[in-house]
Amino acid sequence: MDEQYVDSLYGADADLERTKAGIAANGMPDISVADGYGRLLTMLVTLSKAQNIVEIGALGGYSGICLARGLPQGGKLVSLELLQSYADVAKVHMKAAGLGDKVEYIVGDAKQSLAELKESGRKFDFFFIDADKEGYPIYLEYAIALAEPGAIIVGDNILLRGRTIDPAKAGPAVRAVRYFNETIASDQRLQSTVLPGYDGLAIAIVK
Ligand code: SAH
Ligand code: DHB
Ligand code: MG
């Protein structure tokens, strides 16, 4: 498999391996972002010189580590997570990776947390959308509303392990992700591309 080959080029990453092991030990699902996309997240944060990131869906902190690694000194990651127990695990892993001082968790339904961030007037220059798939269209609208000009929006799992392109599938997550992908590709407020590797990744710039 091409993805296994490219992953095999990279040596062990102690912080990410500890995080994966901690996720398994806590009985949490093995659904962290793909290794190759984690590396891409770090690169995109670095390249864009982002200083204020919003992550939607923390799980055990794997993508949080990848995002925060790209931040400059003083840069911040706001991570929105439904479950307190997951945010607690993620925080442990961020701290162990030396990134604990860069992250703030907001626990609860991300739709509510995003509404509160919007109300507060805070703006962000990088968004990683990776929570419940039904919420993707709403998360995209909030990201655009909270974005500084030139902000980057990344969305994970836009192929839904084949369900997105299966005409027999039409459940709420599938319909939401199809709508998200169509918006990413056609919305005049965005410049974008969609990568089909792993489980698919959408990348957009807010004009
Ligand atoms: N970004 C993580 C993986 C996230 S998995 C990584 O790559 O490391 C999806 C996460 O979204 C889970 O932790 C789940 O609890 C969370 N989630 C699901 N629905 C949510 C909601 N409505 N609001 C906030 N988080 C939610
Ligand atoms: C799955 C994978 C993810 O990265 C995610 O955010 C949610 C679900 C999955 O494979 O089921
Ligand atoms: Mg994901």
Image (cartoon, rainbow, N blue to C red):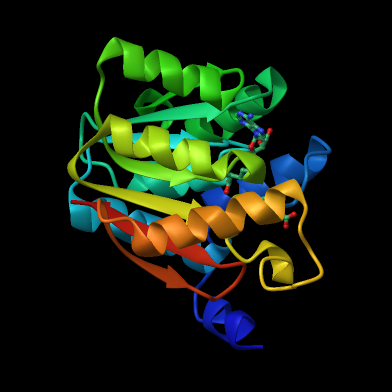
Q: Can residue 116 be seen in this view?
A: yes
Q: Is residue 132 visible?
A: no
Q: In this view, does 167 lie above or below 60?
A: below
Q: In this view, does 135 lie above or below 36?
A: above
Q: Where is residue 176 in the image (x, y as percent from the top left)?
A: 61, 49
- Give 131 or 94, whichever is nearer the viewer: 131
Q: Position of residue 58 (x, y in %)?
A: 57, 36
- Give 72 or 170, whichever is nearer the viewer: 170
Residue 34: quadrant of the picture: bottom right
- Give 199 or 21, whichever is nearer the viewer: 199
Q: Say which residue appears at 57% left-offset and 61% top-offset.
A: 158
Q: Say which residue appears at 18% left-offset and 51% top-offset.
A: 207
Q: Position of residue 180 (x, y in %)?
A: 51, 53
In the picture, measured across the screen, residue 138 lies left or right of residue 168, that is: left
Q: Say which residue appears at 44% left-offset and 45% top-offset.
A: 128
Residue 52: quadrant of the picture: top left
Q: Where is residue 141 in the image (x, y as percent from the top left)?
A: 40, 38
In the picture, measured across the screen, residue 98 lies left or right of residue 28, that is: left
Q: Is residue 116 above or below residue 79?
A: above
Figure label count: 0
Q: Say which residue appears at 55% left-offset and 26% top-offset.
A: 110
* Quadrant that contains the N terminus: bottom right
